[in-house]
Image (cartoon, rainbow, N blue to C red):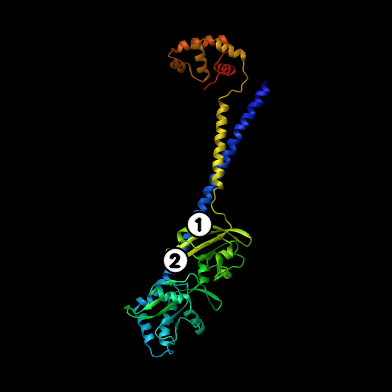
């Protein structure tokens, strides 16, 4: 009988502490994992947001550069003299000023690769160029682009073409520009068209992958950044063959043209046969470009939260079972002790229970509104009746009699 009771007690103890232990473990692991993932994702988003702001600032700097051809009196005067010149081809003095100014700006405007100014009053007039890279054939192509037409339509407002990647001598560029008017605003001088380096943009958003302007071989794994237009065209990437292609085609993802605020999320895609996650950050207000971080690191999910709450649930079950276990006694019932206890007068039973709980004679007297000597007398009588000799024996007797001690 004793062995059966002991085994039953062990089983119940195990059934109580097993869910409690597992619950505590799952709650700790789930909670810590979730907090860690959330902290890492928040930190990475902050880094990407800072990078996006840096790109936005660079584009704003280019916009300010185009405005100089209106606000800078000497530049504006040179352009005005250029379109009024009767010489259609001998434009060296004007081209020198135009080229020298832009060349001096390349250090503070690293995106600037080349530029051209197209006169509108005389189609046959030779165009001004920043460098010799822009041949007549290329200039003719630039004049016929949709970017050129859009600049004309905007009538003096800055325009960045995020839907076209223009190839020049094996390099890919983005086009932007402004319709330049005379400083007094009464006369249109021509169209300023700038070519921005997509390679430089790629390097800016993947600086840790580049050495001397080129991505280091072997560093381009499944973690890098790209720039994508709102329509889904890749505008910058360390993988040059991606530039000018659609993101859906490259990463097999579900990119659709949406407002900037909607794309503050992560998309799932595929790259090199692996599942990748594309975290998006808008470049900034007024610029329909997104910074995309491509990585195999999953986004913050709710699995860790579920593990945490499942752990809490198991802990609750364990606590309930432990409480139930505490309320039960697993000691064998001693019929003789129980019978002896029941025969005692009510006052002696009260004193015996308090004694078993660890109260001193003085405390028992206070509890029962008796004198301390009276309590001693009761105890002497109790010891004789039930055959005990000290307080420890009294507590054991109460336990044997199956009397709960709070």
Which of the 4 quarters of the picture holds residue 317? top right
Measuring from the top left, give residue 255's x and y in whole percent: 53, 61
Measuring from the top left, give residue 196's x and y in whole percent: 48, 73
Report the residue at 42% width, 69% height from top: 60
Residue 291 seen: yes
Lateral position of residue 156 relative to residue 206, left or right: left
Mark 2 vs mark 1, CA separation in Å: 18 Å
Q: How many marks on residues?
A: 2
Is disc 2 in contact with disc 1, using a CB cutoff of under 8 Å? no
Q: Nearer the viewer, residue 306 or 215?
A: 306
Q: Secondary structure at mark 1?
A: loop
Measuring from the top left, give residue 353's x and y in whole percent: 52, 17
Residue 177 seen: no
Report the residue at 54% width, 17% height from top: 391
- Neighbour tally class for label 2: few under 14, some 14-19, many 20 plus, Cα within 10 Å: some
Q: Secondary structure at mark 2?
A: strand
Is 127 placed above or below 336 here?
Answer: below
Which of the 4 quarters of the picture holds residue 400? top right
Sequence-wise, the earlier of marks 2 and 1 is 1
Q: Which mark is residue 354?
A: none
Q: Nearer the viewer, residue 390 or 3?
A: 3
Q: Nearer the viewer, residue 116 or 108?
A: 116
Q: Which mark is residue 287?
A: 2
Which of the 4 quarters of the picture holds residue 124? bottom left
Is 36 placed above or below 385 here?
Answer: below
Measuring from the top left, give residue 175's x and y in whole percent: 47, 74
- Neighbour tally class for label 1: few under 14, some 14-19, many 20 plus, Cα within 10 Å: few
Quarter of the image with the N terminus in it = top right
Report the residue at 56% width, 36% height from top: 315
Q: Which mark is residue 265?
A: 1
């Amino acid at each position: 009988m004793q062995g059966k009771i002991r085994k039953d007690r062990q089983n119940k103890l195990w059934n109580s502490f097993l869910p409690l232990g597992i619950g505590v473990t799952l709650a700790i692991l789930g909670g810590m994992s979730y907090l860690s993932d959330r902290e890492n994702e928040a930190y990475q988003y902050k880094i990407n947001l800072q990078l996006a702001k840096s790109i936005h600032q660079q584009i704003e700097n280019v916009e300010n550069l185009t405005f100089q051809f209106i606000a800078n009196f000497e530049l504006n005067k040179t352009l005005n003299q250029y379109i009024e010149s009767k010489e259609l081809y001998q434009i060296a003095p004007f081209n020198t000023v135009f080229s020298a100014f832009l060349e001096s700006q390349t250090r503070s405007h690293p995106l600037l690769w080349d530029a051209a100014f197209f006169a509108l009053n005389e189609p046959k007039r030779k165009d001004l160029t920043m460098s010799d890279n822009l041949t007549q054939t290329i200039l003719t192509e630039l004049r016929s682009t949709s970017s050129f037409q859009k600049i004309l339509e905007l009538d003096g407002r800055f325009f960045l073409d995020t839907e076209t990647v223009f190839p020049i001598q094996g390099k890919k560029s983005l086009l932007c520009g402004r319709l330049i008017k005379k400083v007094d605003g009464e006369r249109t001088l021509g169209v300023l068209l700038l070519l921005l380096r997509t390679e430089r943009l790629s390097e800016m958003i993947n600086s840790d992958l580049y050495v001397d302007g080129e991505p280091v071989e072997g560093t381009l794994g499944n973690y890098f950044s790209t720039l994508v237009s709102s329509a889904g065209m890749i505008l910058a990437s360390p993988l040059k063959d991606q530039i000018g292609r659609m993101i859906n085609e490259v990463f097999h993802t579900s990119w659709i043209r949406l407002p900037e605020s909607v794309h503050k999320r992560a998309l799932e895609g595929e790259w090199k046969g692996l599942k990748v996650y594309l975290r998006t950050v808008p470049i900034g207000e007024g610029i329909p470009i997104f910074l995309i971080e491509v990585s195999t690191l999953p986004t913050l999910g709710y699995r860790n939260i579920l593990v945490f709450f499942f752990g809490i649930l198991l802990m609750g079950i364990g606590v309930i079972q432990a409480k139930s276990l505490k309320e039960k006694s697993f000691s064998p019932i001693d019929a003789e002790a129980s019978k002896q206890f029941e025969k005692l007068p009510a006052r002696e039973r009260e004193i015996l229970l308090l004694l078993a709980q660890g109260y001193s004679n003085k405390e028992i007297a206070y509890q029962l509104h008796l004198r301390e000597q009276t309590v001693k007398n009761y105890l002497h009588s109790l010891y004789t009746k039930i055959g005990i000799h000290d307080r420890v024996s009294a507590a054991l007797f109460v336990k044997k009699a199956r009397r709960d001690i709070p």
